[in-house]
Image (cartoon, helix red, strand yellow):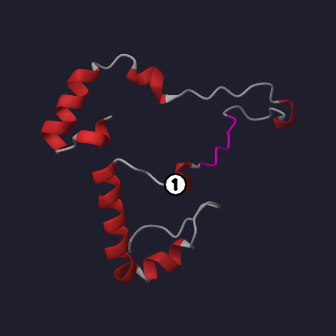
Amino acid sequence: MIGSSPNKSCQLDPAPTWLVKDMRTLLSPPIAVLFNLSLATGCFPTEFKEAVVLPRLKKTGLDTSELSALCLLGLTAAFDTVDHELLLSRLERQFGLRDSILQ
């Protein structure tokens, strides 16, 4: 799956995608350990919580220098309608997630 993915990269990537793909047999075991530790402890590295957001205008001909407001919607609004007890129960039952990862 990794080998067939495109070589696209982000400015936040610590290494170019082509290099990660070429070295995947060497990099996969330590990345899997870090991923599993993150799930087990509920701790996610701060460096991975960054994102680059580039707004794309849907209408052609608009002047991007006159962009007056950009509204970013948080996921909290979407989760306000979810029954949290039901969600936590299903995450534990179906995916085995429990303890600090659900807090």
Residue closest to the far left: 93
| Image-based side of 81 in relation to 71, left or right | left
Q: Is residue 1 visible?
A: no
Where does label 1 land, which residue?
A: 48
In the image, what residue occupies the spot 36% across and 16% down?
81
Q: Is residue 53 magenta?
A: yes
- Figure quadrant of the C terminus: top left
Give the number of marks.
Answer: 1
Decide: is 2 above or below 102.
below
User: 35 or 81, which is in the foreground?
Assistant: 35
Secondary structure under badge 1?
helix
Residue 34 sits above or below residue 23 on the image: above
Q: Position of residue 25 (x, y in %)?
A: 34, 82
Asked whether residue 80 appears in the rendered view, the answer is yes
Q: What span is in magenta?
A: 51-57
Q: Quadrant of residue 8?
A: bottom right
